[in-house]
Image (cartoon, rainbow, N blue to C red):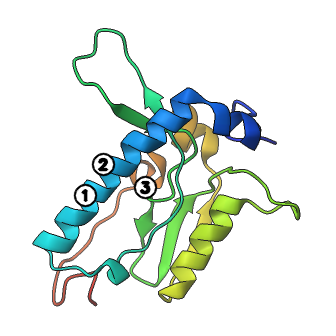
């Protein structure tokens, strides 16, 4: 895969895409609303949230009653699994490549996780985990995990 997601879009083509522009605008508004709830209701500081890149597309379904819905164009790093060991499992994002051939989405996520003492273990599951199997479910839909909630909340442990 050489371009953005399966469509082999170039970054220039992606920047001109109305579906991507609208999808990212809708998603950004929803993400900011969710962050307000998290910071207000759970008393989280914005410094306790790890921001990672994502790319969304406007999802238009004829006759569907909900409007302004989006889907991940690239595998969603956020739909991973925290292992409890400081390692986060995520589907490799298949984002655009920089001049050295590195995925800019993966690099940005690795940098963000490293800043809070974590690291990402990439799982190659694009075809099943993102495209055809769970259609955007990623690692959390491909795995069964059991967590025991004791002591401090996980975000403060």
Determine the secondary structure under disc 3: loop
Work out whether 50 lies above or below 57. below
Which part of the image, by quadrant, shows the C terminus? Answer: bottom left
Residue drawn at x 53%, y 86% as measured from the top left? 115
The mark closer to the camera, 3 or 1, is 1
Residue beneath disc 2? 30
Q: How far apart are marks 1 and 2 (CA)?
A: 6 Å
From the top left corner, tell me how far across and down residue 19 is, in percent: 52, 28
For the view shown, which residue lies furthest in the top direction? 63
Residue beneath disc 1? 34
Q: How far apart are marks 3 and 1 (CA)?
A: 15 Å
Is 36 in front, or is 129?
Answer: 36
Q: In the rendered view, does 151 fall on the left or right side of 81?
A: left
Determine the secondary structure under disc 1: helix
Is 88 in front, or is 9?
Answer: 9
Residue drawn at x 32%, y 30% as measured from the top left? 68
For the image shown, how many numbered marks are present on the structure?
A: 3
**Image quadrant in which you'd find residue 70:** top left
Q: How far apart are marks 2 and 3 (CA)?
A: 16 Å
For the view shown, which residue lies furthest in the left direction? 41
Q: Tell me which label, 2 or 3, sits earlier in the chain.
A: 2
Instruction: Specify whether residue 41 is in view.
Output: yes
Determine the secondary structure under disc 2: helix
Dot 1 crowding, Cα within 10 Å, few <14, some 14–19, many 20+ = few
Is 94 in front, or is 63?
Answer: 63
Specify the label residue 79 is tagged with: 3
**Image quadrant in which you'd find residue 82:** bottom left
Q: Do the residues labelled 1 and 2 touch (CB within 8 Å)?
A: yes
Q: Are marks 2 and 3 in contact (CB under 8 Å)?
A: no
Residue drawn at x 14%, y 75% as measured from the top left? 42
Specify the label residue 85 is tagged with: none
**Image quadrant in which you'd find residue 114:** bottom right
């Amino acid at each position: 895969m050489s371009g953005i997601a399966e469509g082999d879009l170039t970054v220039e083509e992606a920047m001109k895409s109305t579906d991507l522009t609208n999808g990212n605008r809708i998603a950004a508004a929803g993400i900011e609303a969710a962050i307000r709830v998290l910071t207000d209701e759970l008393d989280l500081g914005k410094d306790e949230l790890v921001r990672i890149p994502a790319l969304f597309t406007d999802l238009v379904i004829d006759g569907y009653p909900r409007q302004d819905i989006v889907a991940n164009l690239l595998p969603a790093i956020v739909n991973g699994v925290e292992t409890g060991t400081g390692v986060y499992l995520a589907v490799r994002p298949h984002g655009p490549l920089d001049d050295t051939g590195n995925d800019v989405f993966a690099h940005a996520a690795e940098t963000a996780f490293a800043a809070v003492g974590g690291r990402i273990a990439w799982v190659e599951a694009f075809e099943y985990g993102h495209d055809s199997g769970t259609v955007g479910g990623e690692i959390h839909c491909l795995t069964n995990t059991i967590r025991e909630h004791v002591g401090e909340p996980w975000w403060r442990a």
